[in-house]
Image (spheres, rainbow, N blue to C red):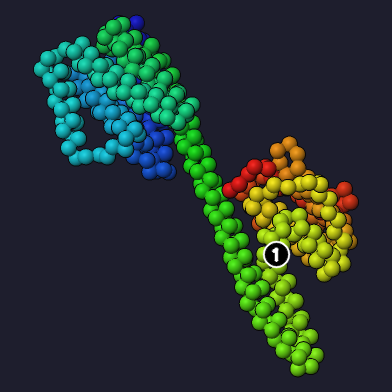
Amino acid sequence: MGTTMDRVFVECSALGFQTVLTLLLALAYLWLWRRQRRTYFLTWSLAWTFYAARLAFMSTFLVERQIVWLFAHQVCTDFVALLLLLAAMQFSGGAVWRPRYLWLGILALAWAYIAIYRIGSMEVAGTSAALLLFAVTLWTSIVFWRYQRATRSGSALILAWSFLLWALHHLDYPLLRSFGTATFYMVFVDVLIIVAVAIGTMFLVLGEERRKLAMRTTQLEQLTRLLLRAQEDERRRIARELHDEAGQVLTAVKIELDLDGRKEASEMVARALAQVRDLSNLLRPSVLDDLGLLPALRAMAEDFTRRTHVDVALAIDDGLRGFTPEQEVVIYRVVQEALTNVARHAGARQVRVGLQAGEGRLRLTIEDDGRGLAGQPTPQLGLLGMRERVTALGGTLTIAASPAQGFRLEALIPTGATP
């Protein structure tokens, strides 16, 4: 008698531990559902809750040996199987709950009543429950195998193996043990499978979040490229309008004033015309479209030196050609913004601009001998814009102090990159 009581106590303790662990898993799935609103997480939470209730009823049956607890155990087993099947269908095909599915629950109740109260055989009830759980866990495993083949997800592989082993484990009841025996062995295997399912689910959720983040990042990069392209198109249009329309009108006015001998008014119009041309050049230099990047950089350097009295030294590889239009725009705008920062914040006397090609990438470096990073504004919106442009071409941009304790900017751009 004492040996039997000790065995029941040990087995009930093991089942109690598994029940607590299963409830924790159910709560984890419930938390995932509240966070992501994925229906299959809620269904899995309900399935694990019923599974925990199933274990509790089994423990009660082992202690009291009353048939009502066996009936409750059978009902929970059937409900677990149906919920696992529904969760697998929701995960794989987006199945939606239908009220007619309640008939399956009614059939499960009816079969539990027949097996326990009419047939009165624990072996029949246990075997039917084991086969049902085997079928749905095997199907769940197949669902995750398919998902793994489609996504190459390591977490799906863990879940596929976990549910496959769990499916095979359900068959050991009719083959290796009778109902209510070898409970400690059963609990040990089930706990291992529950832990594996929890780990697989955690990595599955993390993988989905990582894929969503990567998708959003890709979409943001595409949007950035479209915005930059639209910005350049708009700058080109405005620059053309200033050069062709406003420039021509001011030129005509200046000629008329010169013919009338109104020198003072003519000089004022000449200054306005020069400002319009400078503005047009800043928006979109015609030399960039007409002659290419290198002449445009030289013209920019000469104009910058003329306006600011800061010497700009260009160090460009001889014979450097073959830029894509996108690369030309990015390199030109990065140099333009960097020189603007030098004029506004650096207090420098000299700037060095280097452009070299090698190892499948372009290296653009801009260095000055000014105040360095301490002289840059916060937040550095111009620097953020430069980084966005370089990143849109798959490149990188780094900022540091130059050897002369000034400011150093380096952009690396893949030579074949286009948005």
Residue 309 or 408: which is nearer the viewer? 309
The location of residue 189, given as percent across then percent down, is 40, 15
Q: Is residue 342 visible?
A: no
Q: Assess disc 1: are there few (<14), some (14-19) or many (≥20) residues with their C-alpha within 10 Å of its C-alpha.
A: many
Horizontal side of 27 relative to 340 (left or right) equals: left
Q: Name the quadrant containing residue 111.
A: top left
Q: Where residue 45 sits in the image (x, y, percent)?
A: 35, 34
Above or below, comparing residue 343 to residue 6 in the picture? below
Q: How many marks?
A: 1
Quadrant occupied by the N terminus: top left
**Residue at 32% in and 10% down:** 172
Instruction: Give the image location of residue 160, x and y in percent.
Output: 40, 23
Q: Nearer the viewer, residue 368 or 233?
A: 233
Q: Identify the secondary structure beneath mark 1.
A: loop
Residue 290, image x and y in percent?
A: 69, 60
Q: What residue sits right under mark 1 in the picture?
A: 285
* Between 167 and 305, the one nearer to me in the picture: 305
Residue at the far left in the pictured view = 118
